[in-house]
Image (cartoon, rainbow, N blue to C red):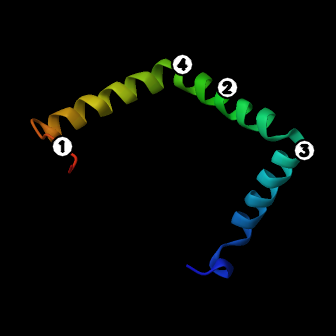
Amino acid sequence: MRIYDMGLLTWIVVGVVVLAIIGLGWQTFFSGIVQGAKKIGDNPVIENVTNAAKDRLDDLTGDIVITRPA
């Protein structure tokens, strides 16, 4: 993928994020993202969907054991 294949909207979003990081500072920007993720994670609907996805994945994988090579 060449860099000029990206759409205008993508470049605008990238620019806004870069300006937000510069304006707020790294720690403030990323702590805000973490706080927002925690709020989303505390939502009961998200918890239900996450649990359903975990159960479904467990059903699909069954007794698969993944081992790492030595």
In the displayed orientation, state which residue is furthest to the front: 70
**At label 4, which amino acid type do we have?**
Asp
CB within 8 Å, label 2 to label 3: no
Find residue 45 and report its horizontal and vertical position in percent.
Answer: 46, 23
Give the label on residue 35, or none.
2
- Front: mark 3 or 1: 1
Which residue is painted at 30% across and 28% down in the image?
A: 52
Amino acid marked by disc 3: Gly
User: Is residue 70 toward the left or the right of residue 38 in the image?
Assistant: left
Provide the residue designation for mark 1. 66
Is 51 placed above or below 62 here? Answer: above
Choose mark 1 or mark 2, whichever is in front.
Answer: 1
**Where in the figure is residue 64, as x and y percent of width and height?**
12, 41
Give the side of residue 53 with respect to residue 65, left or right.
Answer: right
Indicate the position of residue 70 as horizontal and vertical percent values.
21, 49
Vertical arrangement, residue 18 with respect to residue 67, above or below: below
Q: Earlier in the sequence, mark 2 or mark 3?
A: 3
Secondary structure beneath dot 1 equals: loop
* Quadrant the N terminus occupies: bottom right
